[in-house]
Image (tube, grey):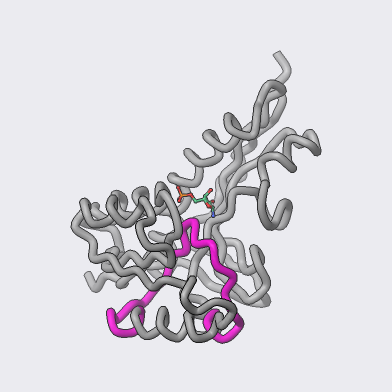
Amino acid sequence: MDKRRVAILISGRGSNMTALIEAAQAADFPAEIVLVVSNIAGAAGLEKAAAAGIETVTVASKPFGRDREAFERQLNDTLVAHGIDLVCLAGFLRLLTPWFVSQWDGRMLNIHPALLPSYKGLHTHERALADGVKIHGATVHFVVPEMDSGPIIMQGAVAVLDNDTPDTLARRVLAVEHRIYPDALRLVASGGTRIANGVCTSKANGSPDDALVSPAVI
Ligand code: GRF
């Protein structure tokens, strides 16, 4: 099997990165993680990736200041030099220009800690709690120039509890993130997704019987 060559882009602790690396160790996984790139020197995830035997590179964004394209050209050169097929953003805290996004059109994934299109941007758990929503979750989507938009590949939901804090909710959502990101990458890397009119469909349909009801009436 010809595995897709994947780079993961991080800025921080890299727990989603670790979930992807672990999943990709399975012999039948259709992708291999060949590179982890951080835009922050010393990001905690770099050490974890190196410990897992993955090549790591820092392309520091800070020296480029406001020249986002110059940073991205270096980033892009690094990805191309490594023969990368697919890019996974995993806590990568940089807005990307339309130029960079167009280089990876349909080949770059992101994970967002909310059920998009609700709660784009930051502080998703705080905002979900403030609104009193009863179901919250995470989304894996293809990256388009507009932030936290783009065809949705997979979502996972959790019940919101009355006594949740942003931290307790974040923890349960993160556990879902660690499930859906590897599954979504498996789906994309195996050629199981199609995008038409801004909508992603896949060979892995949900079950019509799946439902999460929250709160559950006792
Ligand atoms: C995750 O919550 C992810 O959804 C968001 O940034 C966070 C990164 O966490 N995009 P980690 O670095 O993967 O642990």
Q: Residue furthest right?
A: 131
Segment tinted magenta in the rendering = 79-101
The residue that appears at 36% across and 77% down in the rendered structure is: 85
In the displayed structure image, the side of residue 47 where residue 195 appears, left or right: right
Q: Nearer the viewer, residue 85 or 44?
A: 44
Which quadrant of the view contains residue 38?
bottom left
> Can you say whether 217 is above or below 168 in the image?
above
Give the x, y percent position of residue 186: 38, 59
Quadrant (top left/top right/bottom left/bottom right) for the C terminus: top right
Q: Nearer the viewer, residue 115 or 2?
A: 115
Quadrant (top left/top right/bottom left/bottom right) for the N terminus: bottom left
In the displayed structure image, the side of residue 122 where residue 50 appears, left or right: left
In the displayed structure image, the side of residue 32 where residue 103 appears, left or right: right
Give the x, y percent position of residue 111: 53, 56
Give the x, y percent position of residue 41: 37, 62
Give the x, y percent position of residue 86: 40, 72
> Can you say whether 207 is above or below 201 in the image?
above
Magenta stretch encompasses residue 26: no
The residue that appears at 64% across and 34% down in the rendered structure is: 166
The residue that appears at 29% across and 49% down in the rendered structure is: 22
